[in-house]
Amino acid sequence: MTKYDFVEVGKLNVFYRKAGDSSKPAILLLHGFPSASHYFRELMPILEKDYCVIAPDFPGFGKTTSPDREEFTYTFDHITEIIEAFIDKLGLTKYALFVFDYGAPIGFRIAMHHPERVTAIVTQNGNVYREGLGEKWAAREEYWNNPTQEKRDSYRVAFQPDTIMHQYIDGTQANKVSPDGYTLDIAYMSRPGNDEKQLDLIFDYQTNVKMYPQFQQYLREYQPPLLAAWGKNDVSFIPAGAEAFKKNLPNAEIHLLDSGHFALETHANEIGELIINFLSKIHRRK
């Protein structure tokens, strides 16, 4: 049974969902853009029998406090600091990471800072390789290299209802995606002032790409068990990003699913089964 609560981190109230027995091995679920922890609403009941599953909302997303930009710097480094403080507040010292989209650069920062805590990594369209960047990223890199207000404003399209809906449904079979997820995301993204916060993060995403070599060095050095369960029809993070993990982790387990970016919306059962089988093999080896 999933429970819902807040943890005070500095001046923020971090909202999170928790399912399963706290005595069981922990899995920390890190969401992406433009979503929040509700993305895991179908996965958590699948995992809760064997695991303690925890999914926080990032600052500026979902139900977590969304401070004004004058009071909070919206960067991936800063959000990572908040989530690390959240982890410490909950007393988590060992956990597997599930990373998706924005959750990947946040999760990999956490893993680099605390490699001794991370028991395994599950990545669902959570990219850390240039090979995984789809065609749209060329224009984004041009913006990072030559930032103008006009280019910044052009990314406001990312928050429009039609854009958010298509992020969910593109690459999926017709009528297979519930409207619940993207309808809630549209509501969250339309809150006053949220557009500027999200534009800050779009600009700061360049720091993640620059850190790809560091993330890859972490993988080479620590060899964490890794499962990639990837929506193969994603145009943002293409399947080559999943296959690239093999370069640093020869034993990585790679599964390409017939879905898009938000693969849990169509394949929660399949991904849940992959996670359970993957983690059970790790625990048997121990």
Image: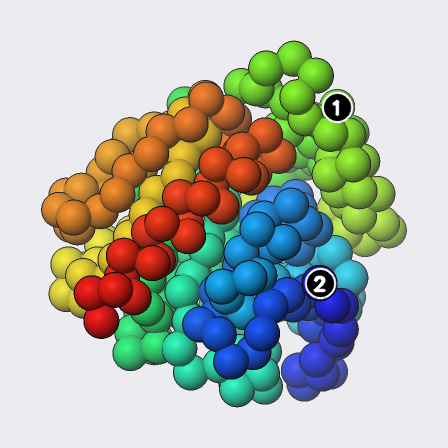
Q: Find residue 149 and report its horizontal and vertical position in percent.
A: 64, 40
Q: Residue at x 13, y 46 (%)?
A: 250
Numbered disc 2: secondary structure: loop
- The quadrant of the rendering that contains the C terminus is bottom left
- The quadrant of the rendering that contains the N terminus is bottom right
- Determine crowd level at label 1: few under 14, some 14-19, many 20+ residues with C-alpha closer than 10 A: few
Would residue 159 be found to the left or right of residue 283 on screen? right
Using the image, tell me which numbered label, if any, was put on residue 67.
none
- Determine crowd level at label 2: few under 14, some 14-19, many 20+ residues with C-alpha closer than 10 A: few
The residue under label 2 is which amino acid type?
Met
Query: Residue 161 is drawn in which quadrant?
Result: top right
Q: Find residue 281 and report its horizontal and vertical position in percent.
A: 27, 57
Q: Are marks 2 and 1 in contact (CB under 8 Å)?
A: no
Residue 146 higher or lower than 174, as above or below? below
Query: Residue 172 is drawn in which quadrant?
Result: top right
Foreground of the two, 265 or 220: 265
Q: Residue at x 58, y 83 (%)?
A: 90
Q: Residue at x 49, y 46 (%)?
A: 272
Residue 277 higher or lower than 223, as above or below? above
Report if residue 39 is visible in the image: no
The residue under label 1 is which amino acid type?
Asp
Numbered disc 1: secondary structure: helix
Using the image, tell me which numbered label, if any, was put on residue 1.
2
Q: How is the image coloured?
A: rainbow
What residue is pinned by disc 1?
A: 162
Which is more N-terminal, label 1 or label 2? 2
So how many labels did they put on this image?
Answer: 2
Whole-Å distance between the Cαs marked 2 and 1? 33 Å
Mark in front: 2 vs 1: 2
Foreground of the two, 74 or 249: 249
Foreground of the two, 192 or 173: 173
